[in-house]
Amino acid sequence: MKHDSSSRAPRTRRDVTFAGSAAGPSQFPAERLPEVAFLGRSNVGKSSLLNALAGTHSLARVSSAPGRTRLVNFFRVSGAEKPGGRGRGDLYLVDLPGYGYAKASREVRESFEQLAVSYLAGREPLRLCVFIVDARHDHGERDETLRSWLEHHGLPWVLAINKIDALNRDEAKRRLASLQAGLGRGAQAVLPVSAERGTGIGELWNVIRGAAFAVPGPGVALGAARGQDGR
Ligand code: GDP
């Protein structure tokens, strides 16, 4: 029997709209709203996860439209509830180009990476990276490279293990433990989720809004991890 296969969590509809795509830093939004980036190899369910967070089935279809998979896509969340009853605020969910396309030429693959790096390396409003993996597959060298890269740059990140519905309870437990000790080391959280079933989406959303609207100050992991200049 598959893990949680009989239940489907109700979707919470959030006010999320496609705000545009960027082919380079000059096209990133000028407005300084907090940003949370999504990254992972192609087919891990990044679009499905964005849809699940938005509570719709159609939002991230935009980002999988021909041509847009190679761009950075910005989705604006309006009126997100800040933690601790501190009112509401807006943020961007940022869909970075997926990596590891088996069919892409080396040149194309490198251009995806350059764009993702141009965003990740210097994006002042970036508050959190959501690194997505597929629960069914062992991770590869490129996932490890991304993990080291995030750590090296002191970027705050969480590991989302998507498609957890495809594993039974024991398998899911084993996968979680092995990712916590392996690819997820250094992550602020390792979260089993299912974009399809809605499992863990509420928890992921809480982590996202917690990071986006964190009150800066001593003890906040972001400030500590990213150094004096606030990056
Ligand atoms: P992307 O390339 O990372 O944007 O991935 P997609 O969102 O297009 O999803 C890739 C495939 O994985 C599709 O066939 C989805 O239906 C499937 N998928 C996505 N999320 C889940 C999930 O939570 N559980 C299962 N079982 N399949 C999923």
Image (spheres, rainbow, N blue to C red):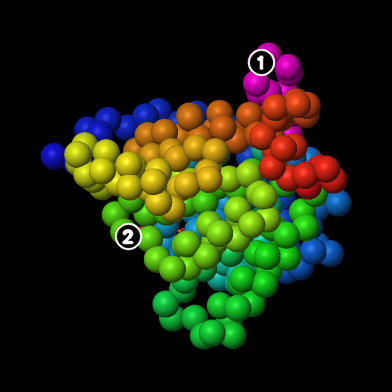
Q: Residue 221: x, y in percent? A: 66, 34
Whether the magenta-drawn stretch holds residue 60 is answered as: no
Q: Residue 16: x, y in percent? A: 63, 40
User: Does the rendering let one see residue 21?
Assistant: no
Q: Earlier in the sequence, mark 2 or mark 1?
A: 1
Quadrant in which the N terminus appears? top left
Question: Quarter containing ligand 1?
Answer: bottom left
User: Does the rendering let one see residue 131?
Assistant: yes
Instruction: Give 45 or 160, whichever is nearer the viewer.
Output: 160
Foreground mark, 2 or 1, reads 2
Q: Residue at x 78, y 26 (%)?
A: 217
Residue lying at the far left in this picture: please name it. 1
* Residue type, numbered disc 1: Gly
Q: Residue 154: x, y in percent? A: 67, 50
Span of residues in magenta: 80-91
Q: Residue 219: x, y in percent? A: 70, 27
Instruction: Give 162 or 227, whichever is nearer the viewer.
Output: 227
Q: Is residue 20 left or right of residue 198?
A: right
Residue corresponding to mark 2:
138
* Residue type, numbered disc 2: Asp
Residue corresponding to mark 1:
84
Distance from Cα at disc 2 to Cα at disc 1: 38 Å
Q: Quadrant of residue 123?
A: bottom right
Decide: few, some or many residues near mark 1? Use Cα within 10 Å; few <14, some 14-19, many ≥20: few
Whether the magenta-drawn stretch holds residue 88 is answered as: yes
Decide: few, some or many residues near mark 2? Use Cα within 10 Å; few <14, some 14-19, many ≥20: few
